[in-house]
Amino acid sequence: WFSNSSNSTTGATSVGTGTTFTPPTTTAETTYYFAVAASATCGSITSDIVEIEVTPETTIDTHPIGSVYCQNETPTDLSVVATGTGSIAYEWFSNTSNSTIGATSVGTGNTFTPPTTSDGSLFYFAVATSPTCGSATSDIVEIEVTPTNTVTPASTSPELCINTTMPVINHTTTGATGIKVESDEVDYNLPNGVTATWESNVISITGTPAEEGIFNYSIPLEGGCGEIFAEGNITVTDPSYPISGINVDNPGLGDPLPATSTFTVYSPGLTLGTYTVNYSRTGANSGPDQNISVTVTTAGEFTFTSPSYSNEGSTILTINSIQKSTDLCPDYPTGAKTVLYGISCSVEFDRINGNQEFYVPANVTQVTIQVFGNGTGGNTDIHTMNVWPSGVIFAGFSGSDVFATEVPSSEPAATRIANAIINVTGPNGKVKFNYICDSTIPSCATLVDDGNSFIDSDGFTVIRFDNLGTCTWSAPEGLDEFEVLVIGGAGGGGYGNTAGGGAGGGVIYRAYSGITSTGDDGLQGASFTIQVGNGGAGGTGSIIRGATGNPSAFSAGTFDYSNVRNSIGGTLSGAGSFSSLTALGGGGGGSTGSRNGINGASGGGSASSWSGLFNTFIGIFGNGSIPQGQNGGSSYAINIFGVAGGAGGGGGGAGGPGSNGTNSLFGIAGIYGGNGGDGLPFNFTETTEYFGAGGGGTSSGEQGAGGSAGAGGNAVSGGAGQNGQTYGSGGGAGSSGGGAGFQGVVYIRYPNYRILPVEYLYFNATYNDFQRSGDLTWATAKEWENDRFEIERSVNNVKDWEAIGEVSGAGYSDAEVKYDYSDIKLPVAGGNIFYRLKQYDFDGDFTYSDTKSIKVEALPGTTHWRVFPNPTTGHPFNIEILDPSAYHDEPITLRIISATGQFHTIQVSEMRRMGTQVSEWFSAQASGIFTIEISWGDQREYHNVILRR
């Protein structure tokens, strides 16, 4: 057998022998074959040439490629390319598993479009078939269809009050595997205190909102297909009606009873509409809390009338809550929410509170005392007596006795009862003092406390000047010590999403002592002009910043003083002459189109903005006027790599600067509006309040808080900034308008016992600095059974009296008799020394004179504290204060320093345990010399102590 590549015998190649031959088919080609039959004797013969054609088998050259699609996404066609003989036919199959078994034909042709209408995975392959040479199967590929994410609408869109636990908001999702984590690029815009979590395809939004505003939240889903957001809104309200003052119109003396009083309540937050007001009453006409409806027809004020009353005495009204008809919840107002009303003044002392003191107020010359043996029933008695301003009458309870006396509690109870002004017996006693109120308090001021029961019985009169504009205060004759607090109006907050907070008004405090006028002790005919400044309005547009507050002032009086303090508990600054005090207004906060904070007593916070790519604009904070206030906070902005945001600075405060608007970590972990600067604490009323705080700044992230825990106005996203909440505190910035700054105020406080008579008819006390003695002189016009005078002294108060000497009386006399006494053992620590005479008759009855005082300087080198015994074995060991006037309830720290320089620090828990705390530490120490450092306020004192074993 021969083969050839052509139909010819020429050039053929022998490929085999025998009658048969199997042609190879391993190569696709055409080969020609023939056979030659040869006889050994008769030659050979050639067969026909035959053609053997070997065609190629079917093969897949290009296989389809699998892919993942979102549901209903347009897919890319699957494609296959095969080679083989003839016209190749293609058929596509699908299966639910990666197998050809059980597959279903789904199409023909060399391409196929897989459906994406249903989620899940299908497997596809193609079979290519040749007419003559069989078929070939492609690779099996997976087409995965992922469902499109879905999220249901919010289950609720709550409107609720700040600091109220909100109902849970749920969104049910499909497709997603979670929610994206909040960052600078991802801001849910949920209020502070509210969080979002994802579990088992449900987004839950929970918490207690800690800021007000309208929050349109948007939470992006993570995983699955599509950019889907869970969206809804939360409205958080914080109605705010801080009270700047309450004016009272009382009936006149002698008007018939029953009667009513009319109140006008002022608050910058009041707008036109109907409100529900809750108030309480204590004192002479106490009663259950009242809910009343009032209508505001003039913005910023409303008027109402008290219930009818039949008792002329003092009643205290307190506004507990205010709620507008459109408010979700009431506001529990801050500020001047308490006021005294009635025809006359009164104060009551009950047995349950023990012995108390009644301090005669300024311009009060007569008091009616009633005592009740059993509440307002049982044994009763009444007595009217003339009094001196600065005098003290003691309400006493001993056993079954209920009495009023001028004999202090330091005396035996039997002596006090025997010399009582009025006395009854009973199991549930009460002592009541009635008197005509001080008529010199001007209508533009409020008598907060006359030293007795309005707020507490501490002997200090407090007057608040809160009417805007000018007012005049006529000081009590002879007053030789008083405090004044002047606070300027605060600045308004800025406008916009990244605006600055308004600044606090200036705060000036002075405490004058040892006052003289034209050489006489105390104020003489002194009159002071008082100006109260309003707060600045909040910004109302992007180029309109918050307005600066107006100043407040205390001026026009003339007097000299021996000492003055510039801060509560501060050091004495020595003698001088009074000069006017002006507290500046706080600066306004910057707005997004006018970004600089305004200078003032404290500076307004600056604002920021951004535009385009990489462009940011930062305002300059307002400067404060130290020591009246501090600087505002700086603003912040970022605009890079698709991240854009900003924050306004907080308004400065009297007690600290506003904080800066900022981000926590390179702009990727949150942006924060600046907090308002802190105010300064004062306790001129029943509670400590912070005045002069700054307002918070807005931001594209978290909003800034008002200074001093909300004394300044909070910043608000999606609404107007909160108004300042206390006197002189700045308004918060707001995305739709800044909050208004709170108005200023002037407070005056003085101890009643420092109202000293100008002309001493019977009794004089002078300080002899050469002899360092207190020289007392007095005279009587006539005497009847006058046995003796006992001289009593009290140091730095009128409570702790001690007898220091005695002078015999003339007995009987119709002519003037002069007396004198020198107190030559004055306290080494000096101070205010008070004297009075206790005059005894022959039968043992006695009466007290008016109280007089002198001011004594400390001896050089005198300390305020005494440590003893010294040397000591460590127990007992004592530390006592020698000069109580030097201590004003500041925290006390002890530092015990050894000779080697090592030291141990003790924070004093109670003043009376100072020595015990040192003794406990000494118990574990070896003998040696130690230095004890006593620190309080801005003062320090050192004592060397020898420890012996």
Image (cartoon, rainbow, N blue to C red):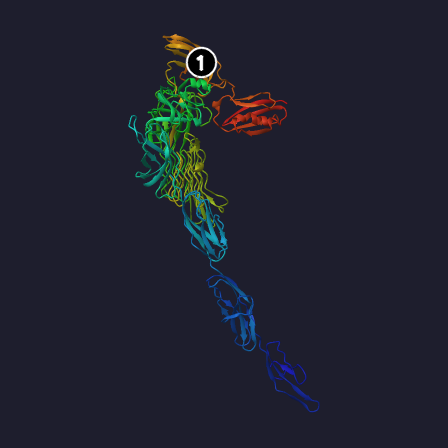
Residue 256 position in % (x across, y down) = 28, 28
Residue 749 visible to an observer of this rendering: no
| Furthest-right residue in this view | 40
Which quadrant, please, contains the N terminus? bottom right
Three-letter amino acid code at the position of disc 1: Glu
Across the whole image, how many numbered discs are drawn on residues? 1
Residue in the image at 62% along x and 76% along y: 26
| Furthest-bottom residue in this view | 42
Residue 617 position in % (x across, y down) = 43, 44
Residue 743: quadrant of the picture: top left
Residue in the image at 48% along x and 16% along y: 826
| Furthest-front residue in this view | 378
Callout 1 crowding tier (Cα within 10 Å): few <14, some 14–19, many ≥20 = some
The residue nearer to you, when weighing 238 against 323, is 323
Q: At numbered mark 1, what does the secondary structure look like: helix, strand or loop?
A: strand
Residue 476: quadrant of the picture: top left
Is 109 placed above or below 880 here? below
Is 141 placed above or below 859 here? below
Is 479 placed above or below 770 here? below
Per the image, the residue denoted by label 1 is 790
Residue 874 position in % (x across, y down) = 60, 24
Residue 840 visible to an observer of this rendering: yes
The residue nearer to you, when weighing 897 against 916, is 916
Residue 426: quadrant of the picture: top left
Residue 411 position in % (x across, y down) = 46, 18
Which quadrant, please, contains the C terminus? top right
